[in-house]
Image (tube, helix red, strand yellow):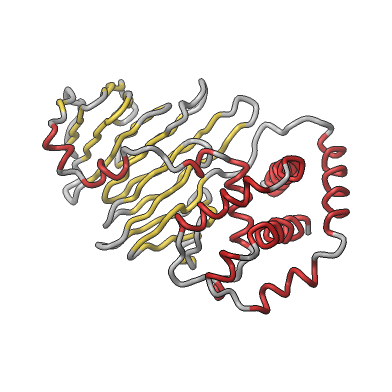
């Protein structure tokens, strides 16, 4: 119940502070806006009551594990998300869970946001499955793994992971592990695997054997029949200039991905808009710019309450 309440409060803030600019400009029907008039009464008292009750239930201590931290930050062209082998209707910043599979067609590309840490770009003609994803609040760490079955991915983590945390990309019998870097992994039609590193280094292991470090501006190539990992080779400027995924992936991660509480609020606002009322062409950049304007105008004490309850609500639901 509180999730619905908080969502209504969040959208109320969105409409009152910004005079409903984004929702109205996007063409959301008037009957959707009337929802607020029906539900607003008493929400402030409900928020205070729920927050006090949650503080009491939690005993002032934070549980050690919170929610899955992956979202579909962007999707263009032919992109399908499968959950339990059923395709899902795509939505902006939709939550992604363990075992979700993302498939892109020849003109498709997608973006997985690792809230608070970075993102992974999924190239055309790729198949990627999230095999694990969790965040521990005790040491603010991330433990995540994706499995690449076809195509290429590029991951950039702008926040270095703590000890005991890791981010892994598995491709066939190869596992690339990082704690904070910018790197790509690809697998071709013949099963050959390539690892490219733009920043820091990546530890690559074959069949659980000894790992090899691939350093900044190096590439590692592994053939299907290899039993030993060869020495990495240097990447040339021409290689990088002609690699579109490298060019797109090796840029600073959008700031919205790095603020976990704020992303939770954004996701909750969007989750309250019915799919049939979402504009066909969702202007992600414009929406995020508008949300940041809204954020700057929300009173600090209200924003703090929202953040506290968002965190508690996420913990309760996972």
- In depth, the one of 294 and 192 nearer the eye is 294
Q: Where does the image place residue 76, in percent across and percent down from the top left?
A: 36, 61
Residue 138's x, y, as percent?
65, 26
Number of numbered discs overlaid on the protein picture: 0
Question: Is 22 rendered above or below residue 175?
Answer: below
Residue appearing at x 51%, y 23% in the figure: 162
Judge whether 274 appears above or below 229 on screen. below
Give the percent coordinates (x, y) of residue 178.
Answer: 39, 28
Is residue 45 visible in this depiction of the protein? yes
Say above or below: 257 vs 18: above
Q: Position of residue 250 (x, y in %)?
A: 31, 38
Residue 169 appears in the figure: no
Q: What quarter of the picture does the N terminus occupy? A: bottom right
Horizontal side of residue 267 vs 127, given as left or right: right
For residue 55, side relative to residue 130 (left or right): right
Q: Is residue 53 left or right of residue 92?
A: right
Q: In the depicted view, which residue is nearer to us: 203 or 70? A: 70
Based on the displayed image, in which of its 4 quarters is residue 109 positioned? bottom left
Residue at 65 percent of width and 78 percent of height? 30
- Frontmost residue, 119 versus 106: 119
Location of residue 232 by image quarter: top left
Q: Is residue 65 left or right of residue 69?
A: right
**What's the residue at 73%, 45% (across, down)?**
299
């Amino acid at each position: 119940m509180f999730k619905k309440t908080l969502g209504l409060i969040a959208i109320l803030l969105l409409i009152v502070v910004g005079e409903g600019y984004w929702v109205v400009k996007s063409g959301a029907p008037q009957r959707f806006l009337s929802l607020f008039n029906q539900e607003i009464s008493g929400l402030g008292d409900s928020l205070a009551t729920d927050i006090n009750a949650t503080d009491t239930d939690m005993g002032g201590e934070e549980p050690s594990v919170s929610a899955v931290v992956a979202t579909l930050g962007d999707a263009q062209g032919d992109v399908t998300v499968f959950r339990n082998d059923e395709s899902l209707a795509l939505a902006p910043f939709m939550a992604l869970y363990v075992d979700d599979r993302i498939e892109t067609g020849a003109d498709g590309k997608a973006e997985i946001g690792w809230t608070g840490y970075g993102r992974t770009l999924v190239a055309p003609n790729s198949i990627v499955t999230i095999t694990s994803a969790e965040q521990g609040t005790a040491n603010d760490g991330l433990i995540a793994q994706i499995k690449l079955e076809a195509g290429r991915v590029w991951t950039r983590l702008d926040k270095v992971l703590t000890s005991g945390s890791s981010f892994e990309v598995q491709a066939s019998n190869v596992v690339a592990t990082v704690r904070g870097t910018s790197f790509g992994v690809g697998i071709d039609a013949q099963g050959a695997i390539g690892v490219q590193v733009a920043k820091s280094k990546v530890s690559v292991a074959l069949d659980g054997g000894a790992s090899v470090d691939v350093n900044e501006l190096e590439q590692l190539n592994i053939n299907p029949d290899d039993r030993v990992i060869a020495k990495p080779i240097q990447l040339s400027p021409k290689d990088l200039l002609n690699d579109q995924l490298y060019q797109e992936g090796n840029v600073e991660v959008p700031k919205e991905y790095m603020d976990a509480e704020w992303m939770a609020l954004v996701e909750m606002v969007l989750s309250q808009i019915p799919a049939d009322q979402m504009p066909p062409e969702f202007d992600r950049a414009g929406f995020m710019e508008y949300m940041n304007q809204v954020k700057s105008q929300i009173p600090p004490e209200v924003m703090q309450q929202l953040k506290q309850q968002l965190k508690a609500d996420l913990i309760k639901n996972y």
